[in-house]
Image: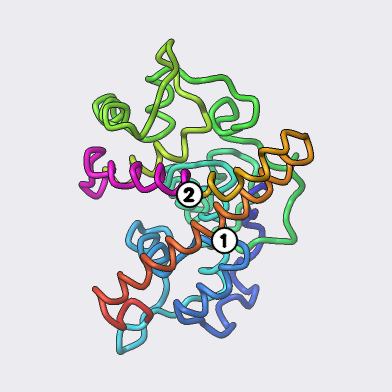
Amino acid sequence: MTAAPRPDQGAPGSGADTQPRLTIGEVLATLRGEFPDVTISKIRYLEAEDLVHPQRTPSGYRKFSSADVARLRYVLASQRDHYLPLRVIKDQLDALDRGEPPVDGTTRVTGRPPVPDAGPGPTEVDEPEPAVDDVVGSEPLEAEAFGAAAGLTPDQLADCVQYGLLTPGADGRHPVADLPVARAAGGLARHGIEARHLRVYRSAAEREAVLLEQVVAPVLRGRTGEARTAAADTLRELAALSAQLHTALLDTRLREVLGPDLGD
């Protein structure tokens, strides 16, 4: 698992504040190589959640410093690699802003927004909740622990199960691999989008899975190890392209709804 960038630089006098500032579109282009799923609306959302603080021009356009971009990298990597909810990431960043150690106690404090160094090795970062966030090899979680890790109340978790977003085992425990789904549902719930509204996502994913399975079905008929490996590689590529298409279509639709201001 790749570690999140460590905030080692950006202290006063480092010169970070004198560098040219980027528009939100330029920030998106900078981050897309490392985070293909990031969108302008996602960056705006992180700003709305008080996780990044770009300057504004007199006409209202956002301008991001290199420290702002590094702060976004820290947030996105913490979500992608460690499955941390935004409230935990914000607590870490708030601690850094106050000049205090973050909650995992491994990041050197600068008192400034994080700017990554060349990147630590995997052993340099201790997971805040290794039993929850180390997905590989983790045992299923009891409903209470799973809900807490996902940021879901017991009622919200029950709704996610009722509407088919999550499927616990016969013993009522939830696979840790389902945390990304649960955390996404929790984030949407904080905006008033309930589990019952998300059935459309489940239905769309099921139809999409059927389509992708049809593509690899001829390869799987070979029933050899090589054939299954080739099919798995193809499915991964198709899934990534499908996610890219979904993001692009959603961005296009939001741009139509909100107008050119979305791209400021």
- Which image quadrant for residue 173? top left
Rendered residue at 47%/64% (across/down): 245
Describe the element under mark 1 as helix, strand or loop: loop
**Residue situated in front as seen by the camera: 113 or 242:** 242
Q: Dot 2 surroundings within 10 Å: few (below 14), some, or many (20 or more)?
A: few
Q: Nearer the viewer, mark 1 or mark 2?
A: 2
Residue 116: percent from the left, percent from the top?
Answer: 65, 61
Residue type, numbered disc 1? Phe
121 vs 91, left or right, is right
- Nearer to us in this view, 15 or 216: 216
Q: CA distance from mark 1 to mark 2?
A: 26 Å
Q: Work out whether 238 lies above or below 60.
A: above
Picture residue at 61% right of the left edge, 39% below the top:
105
Quarter of the image with the N terminus is top right
Front-most of residues 215 and 82: 215
- Binning the other alpha carbons within 10 Å of mark 1 as few (below 14), some (14 to 19) or many (20 upward) gives some
Q: Amino acid at mark 2?
A: Leu
The way the protein has been coloured in the rendering is rainbow
Indicate whether residue 193 is drawn in magenta: yes
Q: Which mark is residue 163?
A: none
Main SS category, magenta section: helix
**Residue to which mark 1 is pinned:** 35
Which residue is rendered at x = 49% and y = 48% of the image?
Answer: 95
Which stretch is magenta?
190-211
Kindly identify which numbered label has been placed on residue 211: 2
